[in-house]
Amino acid sequence: MAKHTDQSWKQDHPSTLFSNSVQKADRAVKQAMSHPQEIAVEHAFNAISHAENAKMNAIEHNEHMDIIEQNIAHLEQLKQQIEEVQDIVED
């Protein structure tokens, strides 16, 4: 039986990391939508950026593509929502 090394589980499961980062982005966007302030919008953009990086990593590993596709669609939706919020904040 192979002993699990000290490596982070995140390295083992890029699709899980991507799912988690999309969930964080979702919470950040919801926060910005309910409290449209610059700092909340900035936080949401950072979370989305982090999720984009995790997406690229997950795609490179080419595992659980069905889950990855769902998360990509969700991420696109979040990007549209946060841009709408940013327009409100900038007005």
Image (cartoon, helix red, strand yellow):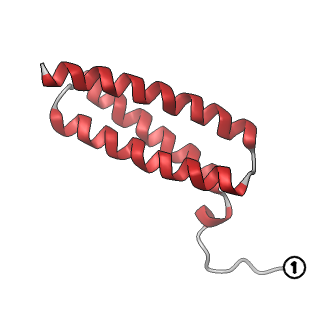
Report x, y in % for residue 77.
48, 24
Q: Residue furthest right?
A: 1
Side (left or right) of 80 relative to 53? left
Measured from the top left, where is residue 57 in percent x and y?
60, 56
Q: Is residue 36 above or below residue 44?
A: above
Image vertical order of residue 9 relative to residue 6, above or below: above
- Residue 24: % across, % down: 43, 42
User: In this view of the protein, which residue sits in the foreground, 8 or 57?
Assistant: 57
Q: Is residue 85 left or right of residue 23?
A: left
Residue pointed to by mark 1: 1
Q: Is residue 88 above or below residue 50?
A: above
Q: Amino acid at mark 1?
A: Met
Dot 1, how many residues are within 10 Å of its Cα: few (below 14), some (14-19), or many (20+)? few
Residue at 74 percent of width and 51 percent of height: 62
Please identify the quarter of the rendering in which residue 70 is found.
top right
Quadrant of the image for the N terminus?
A: bottom right
In this view, the residue in front, 32 or 54, is 54
Tell me what residue is drawn at x 24 percent, y 40 percent: 42
Helix, strand or loop status at disc 1: loop
- Quarter assignment of residue 89: top left
Residue 5: name its quadrant: bottom right
> Which x, y percent locates residue 28?
35, 36
